[in-house]
């Protein structure tokens, strides 16, 4: 846990953070709004004080109430992993600026984010499905995708008796969609 | 016709077999009768056209030996590469798995024989035939033993290279007509490869031609009679090396086997082939291996000559002179031999007497065969020659198999670069040096 | 007896479709969805598509690669993934924290222990569990053995893709010995299911120790002998040298990690950059090479085998006594939170981001797999090379499709 690092982050990104800087074990976490993603990442990458040159992971999270895009970065200026959470994306049309302008290797990670959640990464040149077939209609990792039933809405669905489309017994009310404050 | 079909359907399998055999027997008897009745006429006709007869027989024999040769080399490859890979290889079918290639041949005959939609059917069908024929026709000029060759042409070597080049046509036909991009890639690669390596191949033996003074393979082997130091490899080492490398490329063997590189383009030009058509390609490749080994041996390693001249042993054995003693000998010798060879087994071990006798019989047979072979080796000229030739050829076949098991593949541009930038200048150098040496030696000798 | 197949009749709709299509191209039947797709699927002059389909002797698992060729030269490349997608992340959301371990094993099936280690570490951070030292040492020992096995397989596979038939079988002998050792330790030859939250499943046993001791005495010469088969082979070296050069800057921008990154000159190894477990106490080097071509990646992995042998040696010498599993309740309910654990697997950074919501099932289990990232580099490195080189480059980046497709 690098307390110095927390202070440096608060000093640099103070107004942009939408939540406190949390630290636990060897991770430091900041939350920003979706619109600030491009600037924040660029600052973290280019600024000699931070030099976060390694993008370790890029993923989407569906918290049940809203969506997030989580970036994990590493730098040799600190002993912690930095987690940047772009918070507060709506579940209907989640949009985030793409990180491919800094790290072209994020392209496929963003494709996966789109495929699994439906998050549109603006600026990604190749935002198409990566795991699911190109004419698949659902987004599997969303919390309202219930495993056997929603599969029936795919192009292969309805062929076997098991995959007959019907509304899931317990999925109609939004309270039953699994949620967390995380 | 339906009457026949109905009758055939009514029979059981043994019935069909018996009927078939009866018909076959009838036909054979008729043939035999014709032969016997007209034997005089037939023999006169054959006698008048002896060269043609000889050629027909030679061609038939050559075609017949390709299949067992291919089987043997396929088995050898599987077993030797397996042992190099620290595996066991085939070991179920037959003793040490030796009958596996026979079974493969049968399997290949039983597979479905189809032409893909969109493929150019006549070209697709004829491609394997062309490739196979190109390999097999080269066997016609190779001297297996003194007197044992298909045809002794003055331009045997030229004929050989011409026939070898025909393989390209077949491979291109296969690649193009398959309506498959992998096949196309394979066919084009093979065309480029074979054409590139034709030139070093032919140039490397021109030096040899200057030394030998003839293109006749039989004559070249005769020139290398005597001690092994007379073999041309000692007088044309660079030529031999270039020839070996270029021949490997011509036969599409590793490390030059990109045409059938199965880790890149599935099976290259043969991707769409199955069943016996693929079998033809397969056989053609192994016959090619045999042929280039045979040619290397013929050109550079003395052909059917032994490494050192054996003193001529003349065993004048004329069994007919013995008369009645022959009959007695035939009756007594096997029995005596069995008993003699069974005796040690019976005395020394605790075998039952009949087991000892069986073992003795087997051993006697082996000894008798060895004796006959030894006599043949010594007295009949071509047996010794054939044996030496086969031994040397299979040493080179083993070398090619060894290379396959050990070396990875080169890339097409590296392959072409090697042919044009290294082998071609080297073979030209070889040629010039040989020519210069001949002129110098002649001048010195003439002085 | 076999029957010859019937050709389809002339009015079979499948035949008509074939004739109508005329040419068999792997072009998708829908209009291009993205800029990149439009760019890729438009053919220039003299170019053609060739499909190295999911069934191919040489793609490392089920991977479909569409190549745009100009003769023999590759102009562009588009990998199509998803043939092995099993929805592991979704399945883990319905599984217990303990069940996740067996779910996550088949991801990078060649190096399963690393696939287990990462989530287990993340859960331990969520639960604030301290792993006993003996368990950590056993984890490192087993994991380094698995690393050697994985790199041996890489060596054989690399040679097989270049055409050599022998090295793969020799490397499998090596791998077989290690895998048998791990079977006597964990009970399984491949998908080990050995690590547990808070430790490992069982202590070292006599059979494992005797096999390991026996193997360690001959390991070095055996490995050197295997390597000598390839390192000195002119054809092999010539084909790999200068191929697929990845330079430092590009590698960092492409989020490449592991041996692929270290071959470009960046000495980034998570065991030293962000140490975890007991690696700070162990003495080993980080091999680095600067050429960045296929040969450098290959030689670097072979250097890593030697370093792994050193680590195993030290683990054996310093193994402390104690329990191999921390005391934890059967039903694990970590307090709500997030944890990220990144480890150095044989292919690169293998990481897990776990979110817990207070129940006994993880809320989100994100698995970050290095092979997934590295496969992007194939599209970057191959254009300009020949078809044969596609295989060589892909093999040198060492992807495992189980991890790529999750």
Image: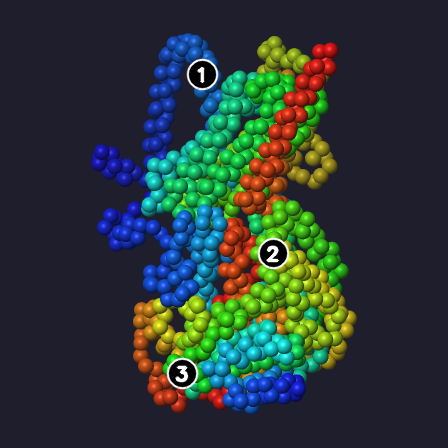
User: On the rendered structure, is C360 left or right of B357?
Assistant: left
Q: Secondary structure under badge 1?
A: helix
Residue at image mark 1? B53
The residue at 49%/39% (across/down) is B192
- Where residue B97 sits: x, y (%)? 56, 42
For this rendering, which residue is in front, B230 or C372?
Answer: C372
Q: Is residue A75 visible?
A: yes
Residue at image mark 3? A91
Q: Is residue B90 visible?
A: no
**Alpha carbon distance from label 3 to label 2:** 44 Å
- Of circles 1 and 3, the one toward us is 3
State whether residue B344 is above or below residue C5.
above
Residue at image mark 2? C294
Location of the N terminus of chain A by quadrant is: bottom right
Dots 3 and 2: beta carbons under 8 Å?
Answer: no
- Where residue B83 sits: x, y (%)? 63, 45
């Amino acid at each position: 846990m690098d307390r110095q690092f927390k202070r440096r982050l608060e000093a640099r990104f103070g107004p942009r953070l939408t939540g406190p800087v949390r630290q636990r074990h060897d991770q430091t976490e900041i939350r920003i709004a979706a619109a600030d993603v491009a600037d924040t990442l660029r600052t973290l990458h280019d600024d000699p004080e931070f030099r976060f040159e390694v993008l370790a992971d890029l993923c989407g999270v569906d918290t049940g109430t809203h969506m997030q895009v989580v970036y994990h970065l590493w730098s040799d200026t600190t002993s912690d992993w930095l987690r940047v959470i772009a918070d507060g994306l709506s579940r209907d049309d989640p949009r985030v600026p793409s990180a491919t302008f800094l790290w072209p290797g994020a392209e496929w990670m963003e494709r996966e984010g789109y495929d699994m959640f439906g998050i549109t990464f603006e600026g990604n040149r190749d935002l198409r499905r990566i795991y699911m077939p190109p004419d698949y209609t659902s987004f599997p990792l969303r919390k309202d995708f219930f495993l056997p039933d929603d599969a029936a809405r795919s192009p292969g669905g309805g062929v076997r008796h098991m995959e007959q489309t019907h509304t899931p017994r317990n999925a109609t009310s939004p309270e039953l969609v699994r949620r967390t404050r995380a | 016709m339906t009457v026949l079909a109905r009758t055939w359907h009514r029979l059981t399998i043994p019935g069909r077999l018996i009927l078939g055999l009866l018909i076959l027997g009838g036909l054979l008897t008729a043939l035999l009768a014709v032969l016997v009745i007209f034997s005089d006429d037939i023999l006169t006709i054959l006698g008048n056209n002896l060269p043609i007869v000889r050629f027909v027989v030679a061609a038939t024999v050559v075609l017949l030996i390709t299949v067992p040769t291919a089987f043997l080399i396929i088995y050898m490859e599987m077993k030797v590469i397996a042992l190099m890979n620290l595996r066991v290889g085939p070991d179920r079918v037959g003793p040490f798995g030796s009958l596996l290639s026979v079974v493969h041949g049968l399997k290949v005959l039983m597979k479905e024989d189809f032409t893909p939609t969109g493929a150019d059917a006549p070209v697709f069908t004829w491609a394997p035939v062309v490739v196979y024929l190109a390999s097999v026709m080269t066997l016609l000029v190779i001297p297996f033993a003194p007197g044992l060759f298909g045809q002794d042409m003055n331009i045997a070597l030229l004929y050989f290279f011409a026939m070898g080049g025909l393989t390209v046509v077949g491979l291109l036909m296969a690649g193009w007509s398959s309506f498959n991009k992998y096949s196309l890639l394979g066919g084009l690669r093979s065309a480029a490869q074979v054409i590139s390596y034709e030139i070093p191949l032919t140039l490397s033996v021109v030096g040899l031609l200057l030394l030998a003074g003839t293109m006749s393979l039989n004559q070249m082997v005769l020139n290398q009679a005597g001690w092994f130091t007379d073999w041309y490899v000692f007088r044309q080492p660079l030529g031999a090396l270039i020839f070996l490398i270029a021949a490997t490329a011509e036969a599409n063997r590793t490390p030059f086997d990109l045409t059938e590189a199965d880790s890149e383009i599935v099976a290259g030009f043969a991707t769409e082939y199955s069943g016996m058509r693929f079998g033809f390609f397969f056989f053609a490749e192994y016959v090619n291996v045999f042929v280039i080994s045979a040619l290397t041996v013929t050109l550079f390693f003395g052909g059917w000559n032994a490494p050192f001249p054996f003193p001529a042993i003349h065993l004048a054995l004329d069994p007919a002179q013995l008369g009645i003693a022959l009959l007695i000998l035939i009756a007594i010798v096997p029995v005596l031999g069995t008993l003699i060879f069974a005796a040690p087994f019976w005395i020394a071990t605790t075998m039952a007497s009949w087991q000892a006798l069986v073992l003795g019989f087997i051993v006697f047979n082996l000894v008798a065969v060895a004796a006959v072979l030894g006599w043949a080796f010594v007295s009949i000229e071509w047996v010794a020659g054939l044996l030496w030739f086969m031994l040397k050829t299979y040493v080179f076949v083993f070398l090619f198999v060894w290379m396959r098991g050990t070396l990875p593949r080169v890339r097409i541009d590296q392959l072409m670069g090697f042919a044009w930038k290294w082998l071609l200048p080297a073979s030209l150098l070889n040629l010039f040096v040989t020519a210069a040496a001949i002129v110098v030696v002649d001048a010195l000798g003439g002085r | 007896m076999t029957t010859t197949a019937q050709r389809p009749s002339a009015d079979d709709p499948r035949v008509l479709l074939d004739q109508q299509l005329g040419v068999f191209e792997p072009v998708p039947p829908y209009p291009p969805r993205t800029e990149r797709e439009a760019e890729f699927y438009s053919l220039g002059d003299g170019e053609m598509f060739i499909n190295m389909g999911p069934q191919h002797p040489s793609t490392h698992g089920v991977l479909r690669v569409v190549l745009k060729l100009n003769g023999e030269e590759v102009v562009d490349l588009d990998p199509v993934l998803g043939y092995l997608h099993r929805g592991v992340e979704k399945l883990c959301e319905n599984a217990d924290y303990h069940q996740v371990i067996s779910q996550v094993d088949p991801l990078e099936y060649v190096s399963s222990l690393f696939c287990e280690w990462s989530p287990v570490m993340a859960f331990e951070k969520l639960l604030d569990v301290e792993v006993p030292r003996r368990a950590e040492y056993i984890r490192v020992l087993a994991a380094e053995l698995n690393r050697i096995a994985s790199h041996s397989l890489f060596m054989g596979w690399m040679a097989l893709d270049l055409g050599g038939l022998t090295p793969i079988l020799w490397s499998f002998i090596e791998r077989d010995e290690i895998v048998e050792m791990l079977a006597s330790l964990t009970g399984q030859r491949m998908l080990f299911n050995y690590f547990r939250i808070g430790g490992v499943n069982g202590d070292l046993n006599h059979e494992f120790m005797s096999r390991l001791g026996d193997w360690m005495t001959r390991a070095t010469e055996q490995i050197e002998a295997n390597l000598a088969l390839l390192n000195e082979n002119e054809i092999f070296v010539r084909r790999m040298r200068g191929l697929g050069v990845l330079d430092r800057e590009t590698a960092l921008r492409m989020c490449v990690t592991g041996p692929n990154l270290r071959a470009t000159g960046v000495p980034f190894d998570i065991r030293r950059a962000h140490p975890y477990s007991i690696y700070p106490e162990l003495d080993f080097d980080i091999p680095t090479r600067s050429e960045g071509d296929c040969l450098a990646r290959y030689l670097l992995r072979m250097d890593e085998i030697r370093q792994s042998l050193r680590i195993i040696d030290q683990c054996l010498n310093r193994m402390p006594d104690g329990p191999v599993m921390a005391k934890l309740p059967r039903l694990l309910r970590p307090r709500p939170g997030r944890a990220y654990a990144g480890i150095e697997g044989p292919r690169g950074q293998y990481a897990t981001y776990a979110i817990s919501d207070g129940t006994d099932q993880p809320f989100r289990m994100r698995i970050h797999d290095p092979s997934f990232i590295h496969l992007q580099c194939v599209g970057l490195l191959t254009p300009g090379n020949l078809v044969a080189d596609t295989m060589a480059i892909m093999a040198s980046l060492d992807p495992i499709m189980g991890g790529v497709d999750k």
